[in-house]
Image: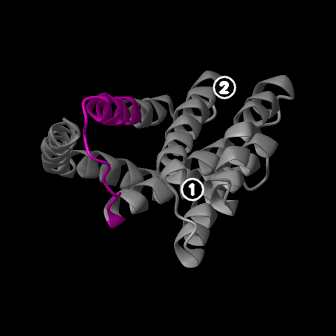
Amino acid sequence: MWTVPNLITLIRLLCIPLFLWLLFGRDDVVAAALLLGGLGATDWVDGFLARRYGWVSELGKVLDPTADRLLFVVGVGGIIVAGAAPLWFAWLVVIREALFGGTVAILTMFGMKRFDVTLLGKAATLCLMIAMPAFMLGSSDLASAPLFQLLGWAFGIPGLVLSYYTAIRYIPTLRTNLREGRALRADRREGAA
């Protein structure tokens, strides 16, 4: 249960209040953006370690995507409040995450079998995890802010389009996994009886 990837994920969760404190308590957009970028990068690290060393766990399969969604929603929510990214863009990211994440959470409660994220889904997340800190740095008083703003758009638009596209592409998978999860649950009940 307490594998290195799970500890990294837990640390990422514990850094969410630090991100908010840097952004609002210290009013340090640059430090908050760098922390957010680092937290996004560690998402790749924990997944790589889990697969490379066989440290995949059931807790990690639930904890990691939960941390990702929470970090995304809280992070982008904070960015919206701070005005550190284009509002329409940030709101579209939050709406997609809330709708898709909420749907997955509800279907999981109704017995949906867990599914793996596609390569396109990972690419969308990567692009957005680069875009949001870039937008934050682009809103700062750094001399290189215009370059970061450009970087935000360069990764943000493809990431946003891919995130909505993959959400639509996941619909058949959600249906199938809900059906299979319910059938498996029914089989288990019959076997126990």
Left or right: 193 as drawn, with respect to 2: left
Q: Observer-nearest residue: 67 or 63?
A: 63
- Relative to 122, is 30 above or below? above
- Marks counted in the figure total 2
Residue 63, percent from left and from top: 54, 45
Residue 14, percent from left and from top: 73, 38
Is 104 in the magenta? yes
> What's the residue at 59%, 76% (across, down)?
53
**Of the residues shown, which amino acid type is indicated by label 1?**
Ile
Q: How is the image coloured?
A: one colour
Which residue sits furthest right?
26
**Of the residues shown, which amino acid type is indicated by label 2?**
Ala
Residue 100's disc is: none
Left or right: 115 as drawn, with respect to 25: left
Is 121 in the magenta? no
User: Quick one: label 1, few (<14), some, or many (20+) residues within 10 Å?
Assistant: many
- Relative to 57, is 53 above or below? below
Q: Earlier in the sequence, mark 1 or mark 2?
A: 2
Left or right: 68 as drawn, with respect to 83: left
- Relative to 91, is 184 above or below? below
Tag 2 residue: 82
Tag 1 residue: 130
Residue 150, percent from left and from top: 55, 55
Left or right: 64 as drawn, with respect to 10: left
State which quarter of the image contains the C terminus: top left
Q: Main secondary structure of the magenta part?
A: helix
User: Quick one: label 2, few (<14), some, or many (20+) residues within 10 Å?
Assistant: some
> What's the residue at 79%, 35% (across, down)?
18
Q: Which quadrant of the view contains residue 181?
A: top left
- Relative to 119, is 94 above or below? above
Q: Which residues are magenta?
A: 96-119
